[in-house]
Amino acid sequence: TVRGEVVDRGTGAHFGVVLPNGEIVRVHDGIPGELVRVRRDPDDPAWGRIEAWDSLSSARREPRCAFAAECGGCHWLSIDESRQQQFRRQRLLTQCAAHGVEINAATTITEIGSPAVTAYRHRARLQIDGALQPPRVGFHGDRNWAIVDAAVCAMFAPPLARVYETLVRQELDLAPDR
């Protein structure tokens, strides 16, 4: 394992860890400013797995979803909302600058956040594994392609939650031995 600091790479959903040689390795679960020990993924050296935290960010909180540790979605659930908004704003400014869009630092960008901390997603990428008997509906697991059996998703807005519940219930009706 190698010790490094988690940084915001400015792109994608994942942060990175700066290694002693200056390389940045993408990681799940880290928050910028945290000092961590990371092990590189032998199958994909661009990725690493945090093995231990030497210091935690003040923005870290318990995720508001019972499936957050298993599910591969919602990568920022362990970051408080105000810090998430700061990261998103900085990423917007970084991407604008990278594409030649000039924004005066004094310009106010109106941020439209969801009034809800949960139940705000109106779309989702669901996975269906028909190779299994019975077939399963759910989400890809964290760092793998296995389907996570999540009966509910705390981030789904009510209409999407009803659709997901119907899909899962139909799946269960087809597979009473489950």
Image: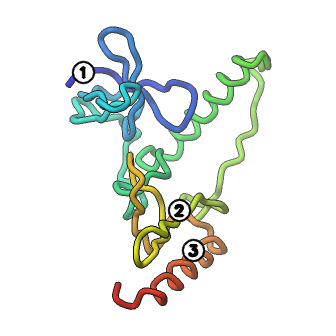
User: Do tag 3 and tag 2 residues touch (Cβ < 8 Å)?
Assistant: no
Q: Which residue is mark 2?
A: 127
Quadrant of the rendering where the C terminus is positioned: bottom left
Where's residue 81, x and y in %? 52, 46
Dot 3 or dot 2, earlier in sequence: 2
Count of numbered circles in the view: 3
**Side of 20 where 28 appears, left or right:** right
Q: How far apart in space, not on screen, are marks 1 and 2 (Cα)?
A: 35 Å
The mark lying in front, picked from 3 and 2, is: 2
Quadrant of the rendering where the N terminus is positioned: top left
The kind of residue tagged 1 is: Arg
Q: How far apart in space, not on screen, are marks 3 and 2 (Cα)?
A: 11 Å
Q: How far apart in space, not on screen, are marks 1 and 3 (Cα)?
A: 41 Å
Where's residue 19, x and y in %? 32, 16
Mark 3: few, some, or many residues within 10 Å (few <14, many ≥20)?
A: many
Q: Secondary structure at mark 1?
A: strand
User: Do tag 1 and tag 2 residues touch (Cβ < 8 Å)?
Assistant: no
Q: Which residue is mark 3?
A: 164
Q: Secondary structure at mark 2?
A: strand
**Side of 38 where 14 appears, left or right:** right
The kind of residue tagged 3 is: Tyr
**Mark number displayed over residue 102:** none
Q: Residue at 78%, 15% (x, y): give it.
A: 100
Q: Residue at 35%, 34% (x, y): give it.
A: 57
Q: Residue at 75%, 19% (x, y): give it.
A: 99
Where's residue 151, x and y in %? 44, 74
**Mark number displayed over residue 3:** 1
The kind of residue tagged 2 is: Gln
The mark lying in front, picked from 1 and 3, is: 3
Dot 1 or dot 3, earlier in sequence: 1
